[in-house]
Image (spheres, helix red, strand yellow):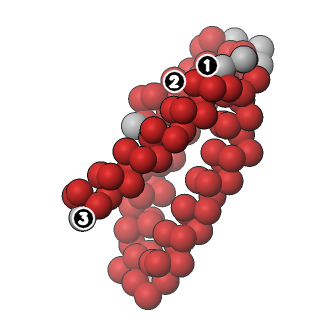
Amino acid sequence: QNAPEGLAVAVALMGEGYPRLRAWAIAALTGIVEPVGGVLGAGAITLSEPLLPWGLAFAAGAMIYVISHEIIPETHRSGHQNRATMGLAVGLVLMLFLDVWLG
């Protein structure tokens, strides 16, 4: 997960005019922060387990916001509206199926 995410950050920064080396350095820094946040999050869970469902709900809401306000409009800009919509629908059905099938 971290490699594609870092690549996406670097490509976006290069698209904004950042030099290649600086874009890759910033992308690497975003990847270094994640394990630190993971350790802090694991510690926070042990301290506040009753708040875990609320935290997961907040994270899910944040992801839905990013997808609906950033990713979906971007996929519809380049003239591939039907493909993007079908991909979203197929992905949603696949995730629902896997959720039921895997329990």
Q: Which residue is mark 2?
A: 7
Q: Nearer the viewer, residue 56 or 72?
A: 72
Kindly identify the amino acid type of the residue bearing the numbered disc 2. Leu
**Tag 1 secondary structure:** helix
The disc, 1 or 3, on the residue closer to the chain's N-terminal end is 1
Marks 2,1: beta carbons within 8 A: yes
Residue 59 vs 69, above or below: the answer is below
Residue 21 vs 101, above or below: the answer is above
Q: Nearer the viewer, residue 47 or 54?
A: 54
Kindly identify the amino acid type of the residue bearing the numbered disc 1. Val
Kindly identify the amino acid type of the residue bearing the numbered disc 3. Gly
Does residue 32 appear in this view?
no
The image shows residue 68 at horizontal and vertical percentages of 68, 47
Position of the N terminus by quadrant: top left
Does residue 7 appear in this view?
yes
Q: Which residue is mark 1?
A: 11
Residue drawn at x 45%, y 78% as measured from the top left: 52
**Tag 3 secondary structure:** loop
* Image disc number at residue 103: 3
